[in-house]
Amino acid sequence: MVNEDFLTLQLPGQPVRLIGNLPFVSGTRMLRRCLDMGPARMRQGVFLLQREYVGKRTGAWGGNLFNAQWEPWYSFDRGLAFSRRDFTPVPRADTQTLMVAPHRRPSVPWREKAAYQRFVQRVFDTGQMTVGDAARKVLRRGHAQFVRGAGVRPADRVKDLTVPEWTALFRAYGRTADR
């Protein structure tokens, strides 16, 4: 048994399955640290978190930056749900398990993670609702060809993009940036 701060703990180099009751306050940072291990090392995760947080990770309210940045490598699914009254002391929120599993065939190679996540961040940081408007801000010129080249409709909402659409946009962006 280890009694250390998970955010500074030396994580094992071999593949692991992680199970934990993540604190609501630092759950995102802890989850990100687990995912950063990479799909070859983090083989599975089962995390007890606030139910609303699990809903966010599993797309209950549409897409978001966190998921768009991690879904090429991992799937996020709902597990068992628990009422706050099942615990003593009673927490402020109901909880649920978040099931995390690496994809067998990631849509983006792990070695491209940093570039992919920077690209997704740039698109989300535009504050634009549609792919066409976001592309116009990310690429001052050539944005129409960029979106068409990815096979994504300019009127599609950024938060509704699927993993294959994000991947296609990333590939198209790389081709546009290479010119």
Image: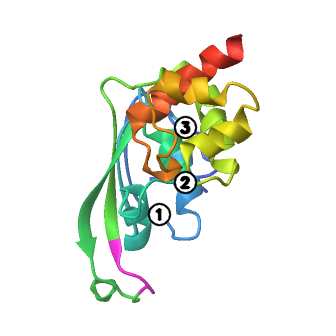
For the question of whether residue 8 can be seen, the reply is: no
Out of 57 and 20, give the one closest to the viewer.
57
SS class, disc 2: helix
Q: Residues within 10 Å of mark 3 (few under 14, many from 20)?
A: few
Give yes or no for residue 87 being in the magenta stretch.
no
SS class, disc 3: loop
Task: State the residue position of label 3.
Answer: 36
Residue located 60% across and 29% down the image = 144
Out of 76 and 45, give the one closest to the viewer.
76
Residue located 51% across and 54% down the image = 64
Q: Which residues are magenta?
A: 91-95
Residue located 49% across and 46% down the image = 155
Q: How far, Cα to Cα, is label 3 from label 1? A: 16 Å
Mark earlier in primary sequence (3, 1): 1
Circles 2 and 1 in contact, beta carbons < 8 Å: yes
Q: Residue 82: image x %, image y %? A: 27, 76
Mark earlier in primary sequence (2, 3): 2
Name the outermost residue toward the left. 80
Q: Amino acid at mark 2?
A: Met
User: Can you tell which quarter of the image residue 83 is in?
Assistant: bottom left
Q: Residues within 10 Å of mark 1 (few under 14, many from 20)?
A: some
Q: Amino acid at mark 1?
A: Leu
Out of 136 and 23, give the one closest to the viewer.
136
> Left of 46 or right of it: where is 9?
right
Q: Amino acid at mark 3?
A: Asp
For the question of whether residue 107 can be seen, the reply is: yes
Q: Residue 79: image x %, image y %? A: 25, 60
Q: Residue 152: image x %, image y %? A: 45, 33
Q: Residue 33: image x %, image y %? A: 56, 45
Task: State the residue position of label 1.
Answer: 22
Task: State the residue position of label 2.
Answer: 30
